[in-house]
Each structure stands twice: as structure tokens, then as C-alpha cells.
Image (cartoon, rainbow, N blue to C red):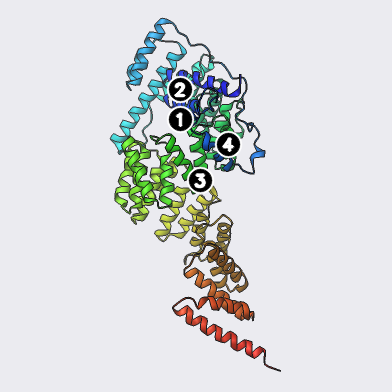
Amino acid sequence: MGVKENCRNELRAAVRQLSDRCLYSASKWAAEQLVGIEQDPAKYTPSHTRFQRGSSSIRRRFRTATEAAFTSTPAAGVSHVATPTVPEDDNEAIDSDFYLLAKSYFDCREYRRATHVLRDQTGKKAVFLRCYALFLAGEKRKEEEMIELEGPLGKSDVVNHELVSIERELSALRKNGSIDSFGLYLYGLVLKQKGSDNLARTVLVESVNSYPWNWSAWSELQSLCTTAETLNSLNLNNHWMKDFFLANAYQELRMHSESLVKYENLQGTFSFSNYIQAQIAKAQYSLREFEQVEVIFEELLRNDPYRIEDMDMYSNVLYAKECFSALSYLAHRVFLTDKYRPESCCIIGNYYSLKGQHEKSVMYFRRALKLNKNYLSAWTLMGHEYVEMKNTPAAVDAYRRAVDINPCDYRAWYGLGQAYEMMGMPFYALHYFKKSVFLQPSDSRLWIAMAQCFETEQLHMLEEAIKCYRRAANCNDREAIALHQLAKLHAELGRSEEAAFYYKKDLEIMEAEEREGPNLVEALMFLARYYKAQKRFEDAEVYCTRLLDYSGPEKETAKSLLRGIRYEMDVEHLPP
């Protein structure tokens, strides 16, 4: 049996087992990957192979130089070893009947009724569902108390009061060896909520090693791996699900090249996977490759027109590119599909923001947060809107909520820096800019923001600003700010040679991109004066002649410089 057939059989079984235990999110993920496996061409016509036409070119596009360094997954597909078999469930008639009733209550969100029905059942499936229902009942009550005490967006110290009893029971079951992988997953989830991160990691590793197909367990484990050292310390079995986990973990740790290599290798088997396509787009978005991201999302929407997951990222790309019509169409589509999804609200919020209707935009971001108060993008985007509205206290609060949820979100730290800069507090702003640049050192915008902070009157640390602009120039400065500022600062410090070097470099880029504007005029003017002072009259004359094409004071200055150049040239040619 081939690797693909093995993966297919394992995922089919996983979909049933996960759904049977009400782990619907993990079941959906497994089902999507099942459909994403490359089909046998002998059994399927070309019309069924929806990604076949574009997938190979997309895979080639994302090949990186680091591919050779990551060889745990063969280039042809996924790694595969003999995987553990799930023990047969206890199917005594009485357990089965009560379990079916409890599962029906669970599906109707009557969690405490489900818990009560299974109070005397001892089978592993029944114990898991009872504890899981009790956990969700506690979560439901926690949400209700939070709204009652603080409002849907307020801070609250409300906790899930069922955690202690669930932990006590599952801990005892783990000690006597009568807990299964699903019980371990729930135990790890409870430990994580209680702040016992080290034990939670250990328990979740046990869960995924004994049953590797529960994506929810992998996701919880990944959220506990905040450093590469922690990730590398995990004792994980070599199974193809580990490759999905590592690709996702690398992405969250901002190791985007490594993540792309993993996903490219997985595409060898899961050629039709929408999930992998979206994750590749996510990595490219972090690398600011917006053109490629747009191509991937357009293909995703063609293949899955009612998809909402990750579409808020697509809306961010359309917003950055100021694509009004495309963003309007996307907002209309998600509104008709499911307007009460946090992603949908964020997309509509982006649409109103691009139109300049910031109050409406904030309204939709707040609606997203009512649906999910931990939705990171909504807090960050709402902070941006408050900055646009000059409501800096509200912006600071929104950004602080974002970093409370995820301290590794560089956008929120950057937003805090901008807010404090607007309030005329450059020392505070600098602190937050340093946090953001530490998390995302390859983003030129962050280095430029920090350099501008160093340039303020209160700080006036020009040497530090120059260092930051150099870093920005080396990080693919798309806005073309760094080189011009380096030239200006060197000129201000009296370093004419360095200033001329950067002005000339900036001028070359502007000419290549056919850009006009005051920066071009300023570069021509400085270079004309610099070469005149260096007595390189021919070079100076070239720049002066170019300035004659402009109207205004620069034209008159160029004429004056040309007269001075010709006079000095004539003087040089006079006989001694």
C-alpha cells in the first residue's frame, strides 16, 4: 500500500473517530486534508483534479535555498512510519445507548445534561465526553459571567470553575493508566488554561504520540511552543502529521522559509489541500509578497467560493493595494455567506476603513470582538482605526489588548509605538518600536519608524537613526524612504561624500522605477553642487542640465550653477 493510500485510510478513520467524540473542528480539518490528497488519475477524470493545473507552478514558486537543510520529509510527499492503532472502544450496550443520548444533548449545546446522563458511565469514550461537556459548560458560564460583569470587550478575571474537578479526575486516570489519547488532549487543555505549561506540553505530546490525527491537540501543543528551543525539545514520534505541526509551528515562530519548505513537501501528497494553500499564502503575507498572496487567494476562492477562513488576510492585502472593487466584492460575498463570523466582520471593517468611514469600521471590528474577544486581528485593526481618528487613548488600549493575547504580535507593538509618537512621547515610542523590530527584524517599516523616533527633537540621536536606516535599506525598503533619509542625515552632519553616495544610489532607483517628485529634484541639486565643489565639472553639468527640465526655483538655481561651472571651467583653461 502506498503512502497516499495509507494517509487516505488513516484520515477516513480519524474523521469518524473525531466526529464521534464531538471534536468537530479537528474532524473538519482531517476531512479537508482527506479530500486534499492527490487522487488516483485512473479513477478520476481531469475535471475532478481541481488543483492539478496550478499546483505544480505554485509549488515551484515557493522553492527556497534552505530546502536542503530540511530533509525530514521526502520531496515526493510526506514521511510515513507505522502509526499507532486506536484501541477498540468499549461498546457495551448500556454505554452505547447513554452515549448516544449524551452526544445528542452535546450537539444541541446542552452540556450539563450530557454530563448528567454519563455520570455513571465508565467507558473511555463516555468519560471523555462527560469531562469535555463539563469543560464546555464551564466555558459557556465563564463567557456569560464576563459579559455580565465587564461587558463583551472588557477585561475580566472570570475563570472556568470546572477546571479543578476535571483536572483531579483526569490526573487520577493518567496515573493509573486508564486514560486514552483524547482524555490526554483534554487534560492538556485544562492544564494550559490553569497556566501549567510544562506539564501541559508533556501531556499533549503523549496525546499526539498515541493518536497523531487529532489536529486540535497539535494546535494546543503549538501554542505552548513560543521558542525554537522549546519546539526542538519535544519528543515527537515521526509521523506525517508531525510535518503539518512543524510547518505551522515554524510559521508562528516567524521561520517563514522553513515553513514554506515543509508545506511544499506536503503538497507532494496533499496537492488539493486548501489548508496548505492558505498557509503558504500566510507565510508569503508575512514576507510581504502581496502579488503572490493575491494569486493564491483568488485560486482558493475559485475552488471554495464560500470559504471564510483566512479571508481576512486576503482583505488586508486588498486594503494595502487599495483595490476598492475587489475588497467590496469580497465583503459582499462574506456578508451573504455568514455575516456573524469574526473574519467577515474584519473584512467589512477593512472595506469601510479603505472608504475612510472609520467610525463604521470600528463598529465592525467591535462586532468581531463580541463574537470572539481573543480575535487578535480585530484588536490590532481597531487600534489602527483609532489612530486614524486621532483617538490615541483608545488606540493604546486596543493595542495593549492585542499584546495581552499574543506578546509576539509585532504589529500591535508597532501600533503602540505609533500611538505614543503621536502623543509626543518618543522615549515610550522607542521602547515599543524596539519590541516590534526584535520580533520582525526583516520589516523595513519598523526600522524606519525607529529611525524617525531617534530623529525627533527630544532624542536627536542621528547616529542611531543612521544605523536604523541602513538596516531598513538592507531589508528591501519598498517605500524608498531609507536611502533618501541616509543621504539627508549625512549631508546634515557634513559628510558630503557619504551623502553623495546615498543620493546617487537613491537617484538610480528612482530612475529605474520612473519615479518623479521632490526627492528626485533634491538628489539632482545636491549632486550638482557636490560635483561642482569637487571640480568634476562635467558630472555637475549633467545634473544641472537635468534640473532645467523643471519649473520653479530649482530651474533658476540650476542656471546659476551652470554659469558658475562654465566660469570656473574658463578660468581653469586660462594660460598661467
Q: Could you tell me if the residues under marks 2 and 1 are in contact, i.e. CB atoms within 8 Å?
A: yes
The 10 Å Cα crowd at callout 4, few under 14, some 14 to 19, many 20 or more, is many
Q: Could you tell me if the residues under marks 4 and 2 are in contact, i.e. CB atoms within 8 Å?
A: no
Residue 194 badge:
1
Residue 576 lies, in percent from the top left, at 71, 94
Disc 2 to disc 1, C-alpha distance: 10 Å
The residue lying at 63 percent from left, 33 percent from top is 75
Sequence-wise, which precedes: disc 2 or disc 1? 2
Callout in the foreground (4, 1): 4
Q: Amino acid at mark 3?
A: Gln
Residue 1 lies, in percent from the top left, at 61, 18
Disc 4 to disc 3, C-alpha distance: 15 Å
The 10 Å Cα crowd at callout 1, few under 14, some 14 to 19, many 20 or more, is some
Residue 269 lies, in percent from the top left, at 57, 29
Q: Amino acid at mark 2?
A: Glu
The quarter holding residue 267 reads: top right
Q: Amino acid at mark 1?
A: Lys
Residue 233 lies, in percent from the top left, at 61, 32
